[in-house]
Amino acid sequence: MAGIIIGVVFGLLALSLIVLSIYTVKQQTFAVVERFGKFSRITSPGLHLKWPIIENIVGRVSIRVRELNVEVKTKTIDNVFVDLLIAVQYYVTKEKVWDAFYKLTNPQAQMESFVFDTVRAKVPHMKLDEVFEKKEDIAQDIEEKLGEIMPEFGYIIKTALVNDIVPDSKVANAMNEINAQERMRVAAEHKGEAEKILVVKAAEADARSKELSGIGIANQRIAIVKGLKESVEDFQKAITSVDAKDVMSLVLLTQYYDMLTDVGRHSNNNTILIPHSPGAVGDFQEQILSSLLAADKASKKTDVDK
């Protein structure tokens, strides 16, 4: 019975030792094995064996690309505090696994220190607008700084990015207000220019309208005079005993009655008729003929003087 118990104990012990001697390493990862506290070897992905108790897996190093996010608070040359969000992408090569594991106790903290040092050495010499405009230069300086130092410790810097620049909230509000006022000024200038164009075009259209109206009135008067002339000539041909004065009187009287008919035809007409008699037409005729005779005498006198 005692032998059976001892056999079972040894069997369990042997099974435990076998289990402790087997280990696996995931893809894109390397395991660091030490023997009695001393570096023994680095094992690649897959199934592996180690001496139980004698050897231990002290760490695993991933060779995937990783990202370190750092938030740096600093001040610009125009005394504006800004927060810069920096992203550093890095990885470890297979050949540098030992360096990456043993040379630095906290590589992320070390990279953060270099990022802080680089940013706070560059940004305080720049204005806030320059920080936004030259963020690529800041990222390049960080990448170059880390690229010179970190490969010694087994870390390769893939790239550095300035993901965001966040100024103080009061400064951001002031910048937005300045931008809004600038846009309003530009909008006002465009609106004024548009109104100016409308006024100019309206003036040009009014001038053109008046010009065409004057031409129309002139043509109308020419047509009226021509019509009166033809009417007088036709009347004289038809009735030989009638002179031009009688014909003019008849034409003016006919137009007078046509005018009264046209005024009465439109109910919404605003024409005001001053009290007068039909005999006023004759007076009007005498005034027209007198004016024409006076103009004709003045024209002949001018020709004689010349």
Image (tube, helix red, strand yellow):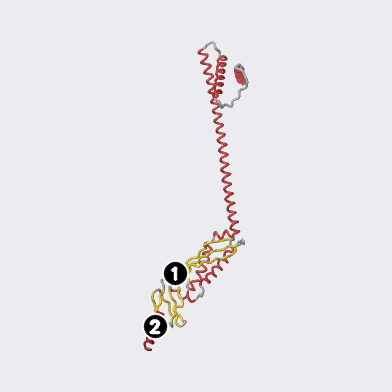
Residue in front for this viewpoint, 296 or 9: 9
Tell me, for residue 86, which label it has, or none. Answer: none
Which quarter of the figure has residue 301? top right
Q: Residue furthest front?
A: 1
Image height of 171 relative to 301, above or below: below
Q: Which residue is identified by label 1?
A: 64
- In this image, 186 relative to 157: left or right? right
| Residue at x 55%, y 66% (from the top left corner) | 71
Give the distance between the C-alpha atoms of the residues marked 2 and 1, in whole angstroms.
Answer: 39 Å
Mark 2 Cα within 10 Å, few/some/many (few <14, many 20+)? few
Q: Secondary structure at mark 1?
A: loop
Quadrant (top left/top right/bottom left/bottom right) for the C terminus = top right
Inspect this view and state whether residue 202 appears: yes
- In this image, 98 relative to 172: left or right? left
Image height of 150 relative to 247, above or below: below
Residue in front for this viewpoint, 4 or 166: 4
Q: Residue furthest bottom?
A: 2
Q: Secondary structure at mark 2?
A: helix
Residue in front for this viewpoint, 257 or 232: 257
Tell me, for residue 12, which label it has, or none. Answer: 2
Quadrant (top left/top right/bottom left/bottom right) for the N terminus = bottom left
**Residue 88 rendering spot, x and y as whole percentages:** 50, 66
Mark 1 Cα within 10 Å, few/some/many (few <14, many 20+)? few
| Residue at x 39%, y 83% (from the top left corner) | 12
**Residue 40 rendering spot, x and y as whole percentages:** 44, 80
**Residue 202 rendering spot, x and y as whole percentages:** 56, 37
Q: Amino acid type of disc 1?
A: Arg
Q: Amino acid type of disc 2?
A: Leu
Pointer 2 or 1: first along the chain: 2
